[in-house]
Image (tube, coloured by chain):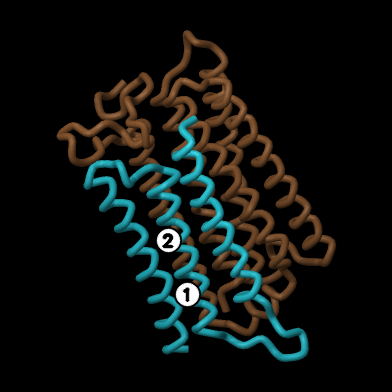
Chain colours: A cyan, B brown
């Protein structure tokens, strides 16, 4: 396998793994205090997940070399997810 | 075989990118069969609806969801995510190796992907068993209904992923059967199982 491709895939994996480890900090809960809803934690968790999804689309699933239609469809789904997940969370919290 | 995907190894430049048609930018191609991409996008939309339903129900009774979520192990969830990310990495390496004709390396990476899939399944069964022993099942409350449904349907997709990787292994073992298009198609499915888990993990284990 080409050394440059190997290196690129390794760097991509390291970025994905690093973002995953950030969840240990973002999602940690202080056992001494009551857990409350948090817009910051929720938004961070969703945005980090969608960044990882887009990296997987572009690097592992190779959409960066794909025709523009496939690139737009995959990017469009990531945007749709962001709107749906953040929208349903904030709308739901506002009307409860 | 489609013209878009191509059956044989793709021509590559020294830097690993596909050859340029016009000499300025890399050639565009659909990785694997376009039908698989249609399926992936369909599945993504189906899961989007599951996720939205979960988020709406969650905002109706956040206290219940937070109390129930506290019984999940964030560390196990992070471990499972890392395992699937390594499996996606090895699958991407498998595709690149097969494209360059390094079939032995491709086969090794495909088998590593399967092994990591098994590790994820074992971790998931361990996690389910732990929760059930603590007294939480599908019908315990709304959160656990969503938890077992989402992780269960993802588990099912991962099992189907073994069939996809199994086809890749079968293809790679014999020169007569090798098809780069099928390797990429199976890889596309496997990566889908990975990115769906990434969202499920964030929503079930971290979101507050």
Mark 1 belongs to chain: B
Q: Is residue A60 left or right of residue B24?
A: right
Q: Earlier in the sequence, mark 1 or mark 2?
A: 2
The crowd level at tag 1 (other Cα within 10 Å; few <14, some 14-19, many 20+) is some
Mark 2 belongs to chain: B
Q: How far apart are labels 1 and 2 at the CA level?
A: 11 Å
Q: Which residue is mark 2?
A: B49
Q: Vertical placement of B187 versus B121: above or below?
A: above
Q: Which residue is mark 1?
A: B56
Q: Which mark is residue B201?
A: none
- Residue ID at (30%, 58%): A76
- Residue ID at (47%, 89%): A96
Residue B141 picture location, percent across and down: 67, 71
The crowd level at tag 2 (other Cα within 10 Å; few <14, some 14-19, many 20+) is some
Asked if badge 1 and badge 2 are on a common chain, one would say yes
Give the secondary structure at mark 2. Answer: helix
Q: Vertical placement of A6 versus B173: above or below?
A: below
Q: Is residue B77 left or right of residue B93?
A: right
Q: Residue lying furthest left in this view?
A: B22
């Amino acid at each position: 396998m080409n050394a440059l491709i190997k290196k690129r895939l390794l760097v991509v994996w390291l970025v994905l793994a690093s973002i995953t480890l950030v969840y240990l900090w973002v999602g940690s809960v202080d056992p001494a205090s009551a857990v409350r809803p948090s817009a910051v934690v929720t938004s961070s968790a969703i945005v980090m997940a969608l960044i990882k999804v887009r990296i997987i689309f572009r690097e592992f699933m190779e959409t960066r070399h794909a025709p523009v239609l496939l690139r737009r469809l995959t990017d469009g789904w990531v945007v749709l997810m962001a709107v749906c997940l953040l929208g349903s969370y904030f709308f739901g919290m506002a009307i409860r | 075989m489609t013209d878009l995907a191509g059956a044989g190894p793709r021509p590559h430049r020294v830097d690993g990118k596909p050859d340029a048609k016009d000499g300025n930018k890399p050639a565009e191609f659909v990785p694997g069969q376009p039908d698989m991409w249609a399926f992936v996008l369909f599945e993504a939309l189906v899961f989007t609806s599951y996720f939205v339903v979960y988020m709406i129900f969650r905002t109706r009774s956040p206290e219940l969801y937070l109390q129930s979520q506290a019984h999940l192990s964030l560390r196990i969830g992070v471990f499972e995510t890392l395992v699937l990310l390594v499996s996606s990495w090895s699958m991407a390496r498998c595709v690149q190796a097969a494209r360059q004709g390094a079939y032995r390396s491709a086969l090794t990476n495909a088998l590593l992907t399967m092994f990591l899939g098994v590790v994820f399944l074992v971790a998931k069964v361990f996690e389910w068993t732990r929760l059930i022993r603590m007294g939480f099942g599908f019908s315990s409350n709304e959160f656990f209904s969503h938890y077992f449904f989402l992780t269960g349907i993802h588990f099912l997709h991962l099992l189907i992923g073994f069939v996809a990787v199994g086809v890749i292994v079968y293809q790679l073992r014999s020169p007569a059967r090798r098809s780069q298009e099928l390797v990429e198609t199976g890889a596309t499915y496997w990566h889908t199982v990975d990115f769906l888990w990434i969202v499920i993990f964030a929503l079930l284990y971290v979101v507050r």
